[in-house]
Image: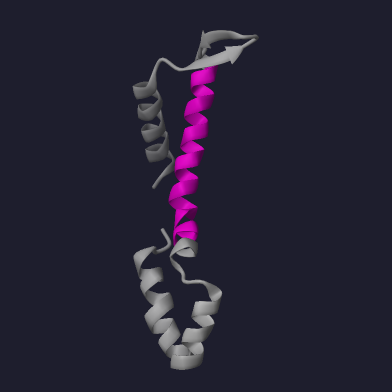
C-alpha cells in the first residue's frame, strides 16, 4: 500500500464519518478544518501501520503456546515443527 492510497482511504473514512465532534471546556464543538486534517493524517498513519506491521500481531495470536510448541518439537522434531506449526502460519499471514 502506498502512502497516497492510505491517504485516500483515510480521507474517505473521515469524510464518511462527518460531522465529528470534540469536547472543549464541557462544550461540544464540531471539528475545525485543522482538526479534520489531523484526523486524516492520524488515520493514514494507522492504516499504514496496520498494513506494514499487522502481520506480526496476527502471527503472534496464531502461534500455539510455547509449551505446546516445545512438546511438539520433543515428540516430532524440529523439522516437523517448522513444517507443521510455523510455516502454515507464516503462509497465512505473510509480510507485506
Above-or-below relation of 7 to 79: above
Tell me where residue 51 appears, x and y as whole percent: 43, 50
Q: Magenta span: helix, strand or loop, mainly? A: helix
Residue depicted at x 49% and y 15%: 21
Asked if 37 appears above or below 32 in the picture, the reply is below
Q: Residue at x 41, y 45 (%)?
A: 2
Which one is in front, 25 or 19? Answer: 25
Q: Where the C terminus falls, by quadrant? A: bottom left
| Identity of the residue drawn at 58% across and 14% down | 23
In the image, which residues are magenta?
Answer: 34-58
Residue 27 location, x and y as percent? 58, 7
Residue furthest right in the image: 25
Q: Is residue 29 above or below residue 10?
A: above
| Residue at 39%, 63% in the rendered image | 93
Q: Is residue 25 magenta?
A: no
Measured as percent of width and height from the top left, residue 7 is found at 42, 34
50 in magenta: yes
* Nearer to me, 49 or 8: 49
Task: Locate residue 27 relative to residue 73 in the image: left or right.
Answer: right
Q: Is residue 96 above or below residue 51?
A: below
Amino acid at each position: 500500500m502506498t502512502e497516497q492510497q492510505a491517504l485516500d482511504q483515510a480521507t474517505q473514512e473521515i469524510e464518511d464519518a462527518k460531522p465529528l465532534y470534540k469536547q472543549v471546556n464541557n462544550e461540544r464543538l464540531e471539528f475545525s478544518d485543522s482538526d479534520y486534517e489531523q484526523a486524516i493524517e492520524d488515520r493514514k498513519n494507522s492504516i499504514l501501520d496496520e498494513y506494514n506491521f499487522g502481520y506480526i500481531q496476527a502471527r503472534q495470536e496464531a502461534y500455539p503456546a510455547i509449551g505446546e510448541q516445545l512438546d511438539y518439537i520433543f515428540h516430532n522434531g524440529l523439522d516437523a515443527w517448522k513444517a507443521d506449526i510455523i510455516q502454515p502460519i507464516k503462509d497465512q499471514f505473510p509480510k507485506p
